[in-house]
Amino acid sequence: MRISDFDYELPPELIAQHPLTKRDDARMLVINRKDETWFDSRFLKLPTYLQAHDLLVINNTRVFRARLQGKREPTGGRVEVLLVREVEPLRWQALIRTGQRLKRGARLEFGEKLLRAEVVDNPGQELRELRFECEGPLRELLEKIGQVPLPPYIKRPAGIGEDDSARYQTVFARETGAIAAPTAGLHFTPAVLDAVRSRSVEIAEITLHVGYGTFEPVRVENIEEHKVAPESIHISAQAARSINETRSRGGRVFATGTTTTRALESAVSADGMICSQQKDVSLTIIPGHQFRIVDALVTNFHLPCSSLLMLVCAFAGRDLILNAYRHAVRVGYRFYSYGDCMLII
């Protein structure tokens, strides 16, 4: 299949620029894969679609302040850095605005010289490598001088206020390490989670630290040539046991988001079991993938021609999903990170 097969038209005004006042007030498009039908609902009704002995799996990754505004030394020229992946202590892969032109040895400073970095690779690569110099733990310093890494389609200043600091984070975020939020999880509130549990539905937490692999553009025409960059997952023994027991008794596994889906489908063994593990995964899910763990999916609306949209199409069928997207556009759903969501069953 071609990447152009996953394109659709989206009016810019439907791209959500701010979160809703209430997290759980989002609209939810419910899609039935078997009947190839859909209808409009609300996220608050999500618990009613789960039955006793089903399992809801959530991604508890926590976003850190991965965007840095700085200057070049000694010229003072402005530079913006998005940290992507830690290679070793104090050495990171990063996206640098104008970074392809920076030569090896270029010096950068951030936060009134509280943090300095040196470019340690040669120009030409999209991801550059930086070696940082600072006093004390880097992660603690990033929380002081870094910015919330809002996606580029949010056309306003990067989040530094309490609103984005809290709202671009799920209520169950615990394990720090993501550079983007697992956005399907942004709709959940403690009340919704309690309503899920009240239906004798267990909730399992896993971790996939959202990285460049999640949002890297697909740059090939043949989608089979696209490879998702590695991202770190952790599935505890307790979570693995809950997933396996759910499947053994015939319950359904509801995945919250494409990140949770990729983590689960990456972790299944040849005998169909999930084992406790902590590793990097790079599973690329495109139409034709045989899903072995996930039975239902809660997900936001994704960018055209993205690997996330390809995953959703793999789960529910390209034609069904793109037709549902066209419906969502016609009736004014809000799209992307701070937008509305879908439940695919």
Image (tube, helix red, strand yellow):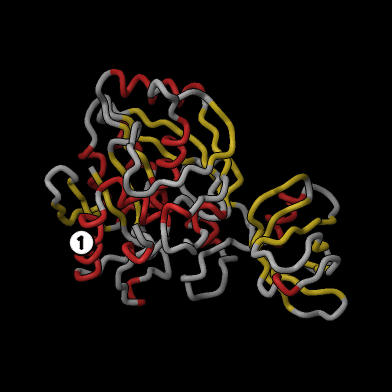
For the N terminus, give its image quadrant: bottom left
Crowding near the residue tagged with mark 1, few <14, some 14–19, many ≥20 C-alpha atoms within 10 Å: some
Q: From what the image shows, is residue 198 above or below residue 38?
A: above
For the point 21% across and 39% down, the residue is: 49
Q: Camera-side residue: 89 or 340? A: 89
Which residue matches tag 1?
323
Q: Looking at the picture, how far across and down is residue 148, in whole percent? A: 58, 61
Drawn side of residue 66 relative to residue 31, left or right: right
For the point 61% across and 46% down, the residue is: 177
Drawn side of residue 94 relative to residue 107, left or right: left
Q: Looking at the picture, how far across and down is residue 62, in whole percent? A: 55, 46
Look at label 1 and name its amino acid: Asn
The secondary element bearing badge 1 is classed as helix
| Residue 53, picture quadrant | top left
Q: From what the image shows, is residue 222 above or below residue 204?
A: below
For the point 36% across and 56% down, the residue is: 309
Drawn side of residue 74 relative to residue 304, left or right: right
Q: Is residue 116 visible?
A: no
For the C terminus, give its image quadrant: top left
